[in-house]
Image (cartoon, rainbow, N blue to C red):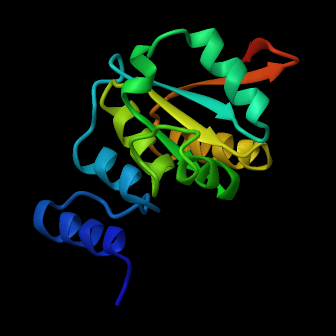
């Protein structure tokens, strides 16, 4: 059986006459194709690399209390998931977090993605790929902790 995104795209084509191309590769691209969002209401994804517990502590100190970003958060990667399982991270999504974050950002909501630094380029590539396929520009902010002083890079 073909992937669900392929089947729904095919049904969209058969029922409405919309072109099948470009083929959506995931649920985020499919939802943008079926239900385009207002490009002025796009949210932001904040990426926090969690390779060291010290990085997490610096991130917590920089945020103080829960920021609006933290109202929607998830983990992506083995190290980040392990920290969540150990209770060192309090997140809303433990699985498919990147997809949840992209969906929420496409709806104008901000999202925090805790991830392993080795996956940082992969996450950026996924966001860039979404923009290339849908025209949806989601701002990415990377929080990097350096000896207790947080630096922000985009």
Quarter in which the N terminus is drawn: bottom left
Residue 154 visible at all: no
Q: What percent of the width, then of the height, locates residue 45?
A: 52, 29
Count of number-bearing discs: 0
Q: Residue at x 46, y 57 (%)?
A: 95
Q: To which quarter of the image does residue 114 belong?
A: top right
Q: Is residue 84 left or right of residue 32?
A: right
Residue 54 visible at all: yes
Q: To which quarter of the image does residue 11 belong?
A: bottom left
Q: What percent of the width, then of the height, locates residue 104?
A: 35, 36
Q: Is residue 12 left or right of residue 40?
A: left
Q: Residue at x 44, y 16 (%)?
A: 66
Q: Is residue 126 left or right of residue 145?
A: left
Q: Residue at x 47, y 35 (%)?
A: 135
Q: Is residue 104 left or right of residue 140?
A: left
Q: Residue at x 35, y 16 (%)?
A: 40
């Amino acid at each position: 059986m073909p992937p669900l995104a392929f089947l729904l795209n095919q049904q969209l084509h058969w029922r409405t006459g919309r072109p099948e191309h470009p083929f959506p590769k995931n649920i985020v691209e499919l939802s943008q194709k079926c239900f385009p969002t207002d490009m002025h209401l796009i949210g932001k994804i904040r990426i926090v690399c969690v390779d060291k517990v010290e990085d997490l502590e610096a991130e917590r100190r920089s945020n103080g209390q829960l920021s609006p970003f933290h109202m929607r958060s998830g983990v992506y990667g083995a190290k980040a998931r392990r920290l969540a399982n150990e209770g060192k991270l309090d997140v809303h999504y433990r699985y498919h977090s990147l997809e949840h974050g992209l969906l929420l950002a496409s709806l104008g909501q901000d999202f925090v993605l805790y991830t392993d630094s080795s996956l940082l380029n992969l996450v950026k590539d996924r966001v860039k790929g979404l923009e290339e396929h849908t025209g949806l520009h989601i701002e990415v902010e990377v929080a990097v902790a350096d000896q207790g002083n947080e630096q922000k890079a985009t």
